[in-house]
């Protein structure tokens, strides 16, 4: 049992080597149903189960690859950085869930005779520590959950009835090195494979394929432990291993992922190669590939599936890659461990830059000021080096991998330096990253997470100081734009900085996907839902995708912000400026179209001829003459860049980039006040509307009943409003609630009937506070339409911005919504880049963005008018529109999607302002220009019954 708490990486495994999916040597997948027995401690059961003949007939079954806690045995635990066990390295708790796994297998009939060569048993990932027996022989034990381990087993194999026994411990010394912010999920969660190793088969090999952008030539040299030949038919290459050959090639880049099929042939094996020629360098203080500086438009990707956890199948991995490509993403940081190796093959094929990160994080030691941090303790260094080697050796043949990352949030220490030195010694063709190394002692780039915009700008200008070495290095934000719940806001502002300062080479949004667990009780479960003693709630749901991989508005926003073509125009003078923002590709893959909108309706479209600009080039292109006379209407142009032909990742016509620009501005809605208010006993009437004579609130507009119309400043705080606990003074979600903005009282001061207006004076304020909003509703009508002007004047000392400012009311029986304004999805002041102004339709239900933890969502920006429930509402000026089948208070109270139960009333918010969203759940709040300050405001709406 001592191996469990031993700092050593293990014993018995073969040296690490390159991973490849297939060769002509036989392979037998041992995935599938395995017998399974769970024990509460590491040694509750003896090892007799590993002996052939053990009767496991009464054991449960689990699916391998998989996590037993997601298959009905025990429960997952979510902590961000806290170790869910006492910190006393390398000791682990006595309560150490231990899963014994058994699988009996025969060799397939076409398996070579046992005398022909050997065999290797490969585990691609087991969390967190495993001991393995084959046919009763103990073949070793290992740690390093997301790394491969191979064992030579040829001498133990039988033709039939092989018994493979694996004992997996949830906790081990290795757990101290695997404190990533994610669910703790024990199990054999990646493939188990038996590989035949014919005599003369390949061992390790290193495909070195570089590109000289000056000569246009690639140089290939495959180093192989076993001599052989390397062929690349398309390049007429046929050379011995170890021999370099230089020929003209098309280079590989994430934008132009040219791969050449080749083969490594040793005496006993043929291995298909997919070769990408590219050279990564650090030059002029910049990260360059093939001589060109790259801009990372990246995401941090954890492996996640809402049912299977980190046991991903190939189709899910492909879906991730396709979704990334379709959203203009060009880079992935494999936070915070090497992914399933097949994922990297997909990155090679479709084209993504990869920062491959080692399976290392010791974040929990921050709780003790990093005392006893394993990365600064020589006893652990062999384990760290083992991890570095297993990553590099496994993944070194992928052109997509351009940077090695030592790990995440592991403090600083000699062990990290040792890893960096080892990596540089082994592979000089890539750069080294580690965010925790602020002085860049061991790294090739200055990397930070969640730095605020102003600091990023200073870094861009080179005004950040730091060590002499750091000042010469490029900058990447390895994490930014915390995509928890609604948001992130501020992405466009970061992108502007990245594109203005060459030292800023982009960043990686945190993170790709919400790690919600499908759960009948909640729709998706998050931290705490399994009764964990310590947990970090929904901090585990902070992705650009919902758990089922539906893109969230954050991803749609990101796609727009990072689009590789800039389309800016001037609708009045009829020109568009098109800029190619790619690093490598010209625009020949894209077809451009124009469309012309009158009052939000597209009246005509046509092709737009744009020259195939080289990267960085711009051209001014003339738009056609307006196709119709839109006089008196609001008119605009929309220019789109679409894929001109099918690609591997999207079909022809797929939208890549767009720009929209106004031609003629919108005429403001006017209502000439002609009607006079008439007081009845219980009602006041004004034009089409009736008002409660006691309260002054409208009860109906024409035949449409209106409920509870009043000023509203509350929104269900978003995760970014609430902020992270370590950010004290600007956590507005918390401060708003402290102030009482969720329980505003509405005092009626006066109802005044004028000649042509009804005026209702109120004061809106929370109990216990002196601050308030003097609010006046002024109603006028031309007999058929009704205009409301709301005037708001803050009173007292307001020190906080407002969540929102507008009115809300209830409508019975609304379902379909049509609007002219921003859409199709939600938008907020600092996350509105993707909002396109035109006519949109939706149901009320489809207006909702189903954040895993419910919160403010679904606002549509720049709305000119909206129709729902028999009413047409025009804004003067444009407004933010939202409608839902529950109140903001019910939304606020909900903890999971399933808490939101639709009622009969549709609650509508028409907002003059919304506070920005920011990224404060782990980063900066909204920039000052997106604040909704409590100041005097006036805004109007015109209501009319629809026909
Ligand atoms: C940062 C971590 O690197 C990442 O794993 C994740 O936890 C993220 O934060 C928040 O979701 S660490 C933090 C100190 C900013």
Image (tube, rainbow, N blue to C red):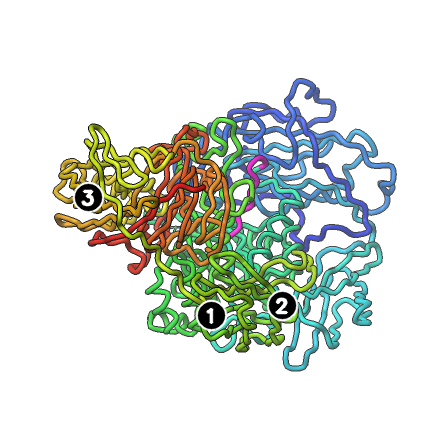
Q: In this view, does 795 lie to the left or right of 823?
A: left
> Residue 501 or 116: which is nearer the viewer?
501
Looking at this rendering, what residue extends furthest in the bottom direction?
A: 215
Name the residue beneath numbered marker 1. Answer: 571
Magenta part of the protein: which range? 300-308
Mark closer to the chain start, 1 or 2: 1
Q: What element carries label 2?
A: strand
Numbered disc total: 3
Q: Is mark 3 on a helix, strand or loop?
A: strand
Inter-mark Cα distance, 1 to 2:
17 Å
Tell me where residue 661 appears, x and y as whole percent: 46, 66
Inter-mark Cα distance, 3 to 1:
41 Å
- Which residue is rendered at x = 82% and y = 31% of the image? 160
Tell me where residue 549 appears, x and y as whole percent: 56, 44
- Which residue is rendered at x = 62% and y = 48% of the image? 319
Q: Determine the image quadrant of residue 89.
A: top left
Name the residue beneath numbered marker 2. Answer: 607
Inter-mark Cα distance, 2 to 3:
53 Å
Q: In this view, does 429 lie to the left or right of 449?
A: right
Q: Is residue 447 left or right of residue 559?
A: left
Name the residue beneath numbered marker 3. Answer: 759
Q: What is the quadrant of the C terminus in the image? A: top left
Tell me where residue 594 appears, x and y as whole percent: 57, 66
Q: What element carries label 1?
A: loop
Q: Is residue 937 above or below residue 188?
A: below
């Amino acid at each position: 049992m001592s191996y469990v708490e031993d700092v050593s990486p293990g014993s018995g495994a073969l040296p690490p080597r390159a991973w490849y999916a297939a060769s002509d040597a036989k392979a037998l997948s041992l995935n599938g149903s395995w017998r399974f027995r769970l024990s509460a401690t590491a040694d509750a059961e003896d090892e007799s189960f590993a002996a052939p003949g053990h009767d496991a007939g009464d054991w449960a079954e689990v699916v391998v690859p998989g996590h037993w806690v997601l298959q009905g045995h025990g429960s997952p635990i979510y902590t961000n950085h806290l170790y869910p066990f006492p910190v006393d390295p390398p000791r682990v708790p006595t309560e150490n869930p231990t899963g014994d796994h058994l699988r009996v297998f025969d060799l397939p009939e076409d398996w070579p005779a046992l005398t022909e060569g050997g065999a290797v048993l490969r585990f691609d990932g087991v969390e967190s520590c495993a001991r393995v027996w084959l046919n009763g022989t103990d073949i070793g034990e290992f740690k390093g959950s997301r790394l491969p381990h191979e064992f030579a087993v040829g001498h133990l194999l039988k033709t039939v009835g092989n018994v493979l026994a694996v004992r997996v411990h949830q906790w081990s010394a290795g757990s101290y090195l695997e404190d990533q912010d994610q669910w703790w999920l024990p199990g054999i969660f990646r493939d188990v494979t038996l590989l035949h190793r014919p005599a003369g088969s390949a061992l390790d090999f290193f495909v070195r394929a570089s590109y000289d952008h000056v000569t246009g030539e690639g140089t290939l040299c495959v180093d192989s432990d076993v001599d052989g030949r390397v062929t690349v038919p398309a390049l007429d290459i046929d050379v011995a291993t170890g021999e370099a050959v230089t020929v003209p090639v098309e280079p590989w880049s994430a934008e132009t992922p040219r791969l050449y099929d080749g083969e490594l042939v040793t005496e006993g094996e043929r291995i298909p190669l997919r070769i990408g020629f590219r050279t990564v360098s650090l030059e002029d203080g910049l990260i360059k590939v093939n001589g060109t500086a790259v801009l990372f438009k990246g995401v941090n990707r954890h492996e996640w599936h809402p049912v299977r956890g980190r046991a991903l199948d190939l189709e899910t991995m492909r879906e991730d890659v396709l979704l990334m490509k379709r959203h203009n993403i060009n880079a992935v940081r494999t936070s915070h461990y090497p992914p399933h190796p097949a994922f990297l093959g997909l990155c090679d094929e479709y084209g993504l830059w990869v920062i491959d990160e080692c399976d290392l994080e010791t974040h929990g030691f921050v709780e003790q000021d990093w005392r006893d941090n394993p990365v600064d303790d020589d006893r652990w260094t062999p384990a760290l080096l083992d991890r570095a080697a297993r990553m590099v050796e496994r993944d070194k043949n992928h052109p997509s991998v351009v940077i090695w990352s030592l790990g995440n949030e592991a403090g600083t220490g000699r062990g990290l330096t040792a890893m960096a030195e080892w990596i540089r010694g082994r592979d000089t063709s890539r750069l080294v990253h580690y965010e925790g190394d602020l002085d860049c002692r061991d790294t090739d780039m200055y990397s930070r997470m969640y730095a605020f915009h102003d600091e990023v700008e200073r870094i861009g200008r080179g005004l950040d100081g730091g060590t002499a070495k750091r000042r010469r290095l490029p900058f990447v934000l390895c994490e930014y734009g915390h995509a928890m719940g609604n948001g992130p806001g501020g992405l466009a502002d970061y992108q502007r900085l990245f594109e203005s300062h060459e030292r800023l080479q982009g960043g990686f949004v945190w993170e790709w996907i919400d790690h919600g667990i499908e759960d009948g009780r909640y729709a998706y479960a998050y931290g705490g839902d399994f009764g964990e003693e310590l947990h970090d709630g929904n901090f585990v749901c902070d992705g650009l995708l919902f758990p089922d991989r539906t893109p969230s508005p954050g991803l749609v926003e990101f796609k727009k912000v990072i689009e590789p073509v800039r389309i800016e125009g001037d609708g009045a003078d009829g020109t568009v400026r098109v800029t190619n923002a790619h690093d490598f590709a010209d625009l020949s893959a894209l077809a451009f179209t124009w469309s012309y909108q009158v009052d939000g309706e597209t009246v005509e479209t046509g092709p737009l001829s744009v020259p195939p600009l080289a990267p960085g080039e711009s051209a001014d292109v003339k738009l056609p003459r307006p196709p119709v006379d839109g006089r008196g209407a609001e008119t605009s142009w929309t220019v789109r860049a679409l894929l001109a032909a099918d690609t591997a990742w999207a079909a022809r016509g797929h939208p890549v980039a767009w720009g929209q620009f106004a031609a003629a501005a919108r005429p403001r809605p006017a209502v000439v006040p002609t009607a006079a208010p008439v007081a009845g006993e219980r009602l006041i009437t004004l034009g089409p509307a009736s008002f409660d004579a006691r309260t002054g609130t409208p009860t109906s507009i024409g035949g449409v009943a209106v409920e509870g119309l009043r000023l509203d400043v509350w929104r269900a705080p978003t995760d970014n409003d609430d902020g992270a606990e370590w950010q004290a003074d600007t956590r507005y979600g918390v401060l708003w609630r402290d102030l009482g903005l969720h329980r505003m009282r509405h005092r009626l001061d006066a109802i005044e009937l004028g000649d042509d207006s009804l005026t209702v004076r109120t004061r809106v304020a929370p109990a216990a506070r002196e601050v308030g909003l003097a609010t006046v509703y002024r109603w006028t009508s031309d007999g058929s339409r009704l205009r409301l002007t709301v005037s708001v004047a803050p009173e007292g000392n307001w020190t906080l911005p407002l969540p929102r400012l507008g009115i809300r009311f209830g409508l019975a029986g609304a379902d379909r919504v049509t609007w002219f304004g921003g859409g199709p999805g939600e938008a907020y002041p600092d996350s509105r880049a993707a909002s396109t102004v035109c006519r949109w339709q939706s149901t009320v239900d489809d207006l909702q963005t189903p954040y895993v933890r419910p919160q403010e969502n679904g606002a549509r920006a720049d709305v000119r008018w909206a129709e729902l429930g028999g009413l047409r509402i025009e804004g003067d000026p444009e407004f933010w529109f939202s409608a839902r089948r529950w109140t903001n208070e019910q939304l606020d109270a909900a903890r999971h999607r399933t808490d939101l139960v639709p009622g009969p009333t549709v609650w509508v918010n028409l907002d003059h302002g919304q506070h920005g969203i920011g990224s404060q759940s782990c980063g900066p709040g909204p920039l000052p220009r997106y604040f909704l300050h409590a100041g005097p405001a006036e805004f109007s709406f015109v209501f009319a019954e629809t026909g």
